[in-house]
Amino acid sequence: MAYTRNLWDNLELYNIESITFNALAKPQQQGAVALGLGKSTWDCFVNHYSGLYWEDLQVAGAAQHYEVLGWNQDAWDEDGTPPDTADTYWADLSVDQQEAAYNLCYWENSWNWISLDEW
């Protein structure tokens, strides 16, 4: 399956976006790099580290930011109940939560799942 306009314009809909860069097939990695998305930019901006286990989030320095957003290892690794912030609009996040989200490569439009064609 290839990207369609809908998949491209709406973040996190295409299943490839939940895969870490290292787990991508070589041709997919090459395509990402051709778009200017290396490992660090792919894992942060494309999937916001969603393909990692909590232990790997800690190594990547991302767990601390997810903790500010209310996540913990059980909720993350065991597909537990997401924190309330998962359904909270950017404007309703605290300043600390917005900063944590920003450090996970979110900004208001991506956090609120605004389609790219509306940016």
Image (cartoon, grey):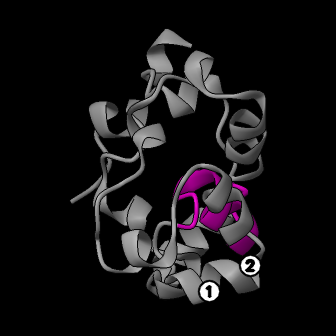
Q: Amino acid at mark 2?
A: Ala
**Marker disc for residue 100:** none
Q: Nearer the viewer, residue 65 or 103?
A: 65
User: Can you give x and y, in whole percent of width and height, for residue 54 in the image?
Assistant: 54, 81
How packed mark 1 is, by other alpha carbons closer than 10 Å (few <14, some 14-19, many 20 or more), is: few
Element assignment for label 1: helix
Residue at 63%, 61% (x, y): give it. Answer: 67
User: Can you give x and y, in whole percent of width and height, for residue 53 in the image?
Assistant: 49, 83
How packed mark 2 is, by other alpha carbons closer than 10 Å (few <14, some 14-19, many 20 or more), is: some
Indicate whether 75 appears above or below 69: below
The residue identified by callout 2 is: 60
User: Can you give x and y, in whole percent of width and height, for residue 89 in the image?
Assistant: 49, 22
State which region is magenta. 35-49
Q: What quarter of the picture does the C terminus occupy? A: top right
Element assignment for label 2: helix
Does 62 sit left or right of 50 as displayed? right
The residue identified by callout 1 is: 56
